[in-house]
Amino acid sequence: GGGEDTGAYAEQGAEVDAEADANAEAEAQAEVGVEAFPALVLGSADFHATNPAEVTLASGQIQFIEFFAYWCSTCKAMAPHVHGLEQLYGDRVNFVYLDRDDPATANFQAQLGYVYQPHIFILDGAGNILYQSVYFTEAVDLQAAIEAALANN
């Protein structure tokens, strides 16, 4: 009976190898998917607030809304990345920057459930929240959320 055991172990080993190969292939495909996104760029580090009177949550297009504060160090650190995303996607996504300290943004803060800056929301054309993140968020994660929003609309 020793020969049979060896055969069983050999088969098991082959299955493990096949699974490892499949996992490696899936990871490679996932990496290709990310690389298919436009390459990230850095934009301006300067803040600019959107006039709240010109903002409509149900705008008919995908919107990237960021609540920021001029004094917020995390907002400052993210600004070049967010503005870089605006350079890449600004033709298909409406980028809106709301100063959390501006009383005119209070209504939007209440409607969206603002927590703390920077608080980013990605909305569909009807104003539904597709994605949100609070505090520091990597540009690649924001890009993936933008790509997902565009793919589903």
Image: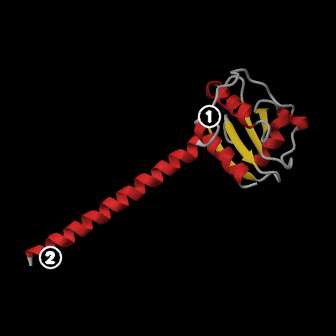
Residue 11 locus on image (x, y percent)? 25, 69
Q: Is residue 36 left or right of residue 102?
A: left
Residue linked to disc 1: 39
Of the residues shown, which amino acid type is indicated by label 2?
Answer: Glu
Specify few, some or many for label 1: CA neighbours under 10 Å numbering under 14, 14-19, or 20 or more: few
The one of 84 and 9 positioned closer to us in this rendering: 9
Q: Is residue 90 left or right of residue 34?
A: right
First of labels 2, 1 by sequence position:
2
Residue 40 locus on image (x, y percent)? 62, 32
Q: Is residue 113 left or right of residue 20?
A: right
- Give the label, 2 or 1, closer to the camera: 2
Residue linked to disc 2: 4
Of the residues shown, which amino acid type is indicated by label 1?
Answer: Ala
Q: Is residue 8 left or right of residue 25?
A: left
Considering the image in quadrants, where does the N terminus appear? bottom left
Specify few, some or many for label 2: CA neighbours under 10 Å numbering under 14, 14-19, or 20 or more: few
Residue at the image position 69 percent from the left and 40 percent from the top = 120
Q: Relative to residue 134, is residue 126 depicted above or below?
A: below
